Amino acid sequence: MGVVKHQSLKSTVLIYFGFLVGGINTLLLFPHFFTDDEFALTRLFLDIGVILVPFCTLSTGPSVNRFFPYYASHLKEKDNDLISWAFLFSLLGFFLFVLATFVFHNWILREYAANSPLFISYFYLLYPYVFFFSLFGLFESYSGSRHQTVLPNFLKEVVVRVATTALVIACYLHWISFTAFMWLFSLLSGFTLVILLVYLRRRKMLHFTFRMSNVTRRLFPRMAVYSLSLLGATIFSLLAQNIGSLIISSRQGLKHVAYLSIAYYIATLIQVPQRSIAGIATPVLAQSWKERDMEKIGEIYQKSSLLQLIAALFIFLAIWLNIDNIFSFLPPSYSVGKYAVFLLGLSKVIDMGTGLNSQLLSTSRWWRFDLYSSGILLALSVPLNVVLIEKYGLDGTGYAALLSMFVFNTVRCLFIWKKFGLLPFTAATGKAILIAISAWLAAVWLPAAPSALADICLRSALFAVVFIGGILLFRVSGDINSTAGAMLQKILSYLSRSYKQ
């Protein structure tokens, strides 16, 4: 767990810095500099890209993580052909995507032309966007299998967002047209892909060989079944989590996607620690399953659950504590998404609090259940979104996410408990929840400050002091206490050296 903790800490810092830049883009620049439809178009591209990555790569990314330990232990570096075949199959997947858009062209026009004409006008830019976005996702997975997660996170979370900021400002100042903006926006992942490939090549971690190794011949049937099953599971899961924006853009128009995207973005902040922890823990879990080290798997499962829950509660309650202040910085029309933030955020807390159940299942011999449970999630999410959006508007997406995510994670936790005897919860779970509620109650009654920014700072500071102090005082997590102790020791050591000089 030490490797997971230290590398995920670095990745989390980078991701949060990226989200700070992304927050400026999403909450300040896009809503004020672009029309609602133009802003929504960029969010729709992102949602579609996220959904299509597993399809266009034929889910070879998870296969790279799952089977890389077998290749690494049986082949020399230059004879390792895993990434070469994954790359070829990704090209095949992209070709199938292009073919599908031509086959369903009339249906796409019928569904989106009336309420989202701007999407139809720029549909052709999905091709470069999805191509580079998918390939970056593949090589990001490969980097993770080599325990190289910091640069991919920096490129994806920081570089892309800083470049987007520059493009938004350039478009607002009329240095470039909106069409030029969309072209450059669609090519950003290509730029980061080139940097990542050069980095891996210089570190002698990237070699392409299309001579089929004995390992590939032996494992290919298993890898094919695994990839196709995970393809279904991943697409089901991503569709379930992103279907709301597609339904709203079709039924209510692009501007409502802009309102929903704010709620999604704020709620997504809660999941940032999960992304960094999962990126590091997945190859560690794969290696542990290979070595049949159930003690280590159980340790990662419980510790990841606790760390993720603490982080999720802290971020979720800090956001809800300041929700009115946050929306005060946006145009008034965006406030319609206030309660969608609460519902979506609560669904993220449930997902994170149940630990790395997806990664644990997908790297185990019971990986097929990942497909079955994701099918349950999609089967719940689609009808719930259709019915609840019709009845409650944007809030309907939040209700749908909360209900479907609760059932989804309950099913997975019960399955893991039955098959492996593992539960993500410990006595510390209850402590963390009680401390979080106490900290929120302490800060919510604070009198309002003269300005929204001052109120956010004062309220958040009080909440943070009570929350973090409670977590450390009651030693809820040994990892957090040891990390805090190490940081304090470094600070004291630095101050001591400075004093002696």
Image (cartoon, rainbow, N blue to C red):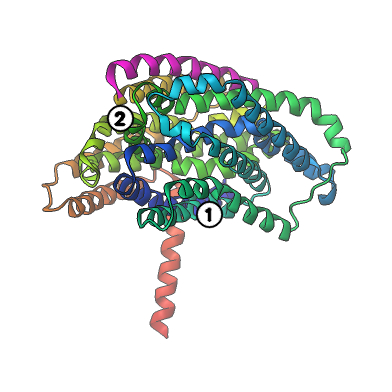
For the question of whether residue 352 can be seen, the reply is no
Relative depth, front residue between 139 and 219? 139
Give the residue displayed 38% in from the left and 28% down from the top: 347
Give the Cα distance between marks 1 and 2. 29 Å
Mark 2 sits on what residue? 340
Give the residue displayed 47% in from the left and 55% down from the top: 163
Give the residue displayed 75% in from the left and 29% down from the top: 223
Q: Residues within 10 Å of mark 1 (few under 14, many from 20)?
A: some
Residue 412 position, x and y percent, is: 52, 22
Relative depth, front residue between 271 and 48? 48
Left or right: 125 with respect to 41? Answer: right
The amino acid beneath tag 1 is: Phe
Q: In this rendering, is residue 306 above or below 96?
A: below
Q: In this rendering, is residue 431 above or below 280?
A: above
Callouts 1 and 2 close, C-beta under 8 Å: no
Residue at the outermost bottom position: 501
Mark 1 sits on what residue? 154
Left or right: 11 with respect to 313? Answer: right
Is 363 magenta? The answer is no
Relative depth, front residue between 176 and 283? 176
Residue 430 position, x and y percent, is: 36, 32
Task: Describe the element under mark 2 as helix, strand or loop.
Answer: helix
Residue 201 position, x and y percent, is: 73, 56
Mark 1 and mark 2 lie on one chain; the one further toward the N terminus is 1
The amino acid beneath tag 2 is: Ala
Q: Which residues are magenta?
A: 368-393
Q: Main secondary structure of the magenta part?
A: helix
Residue 455 position, x and y percent, is: 18, 51
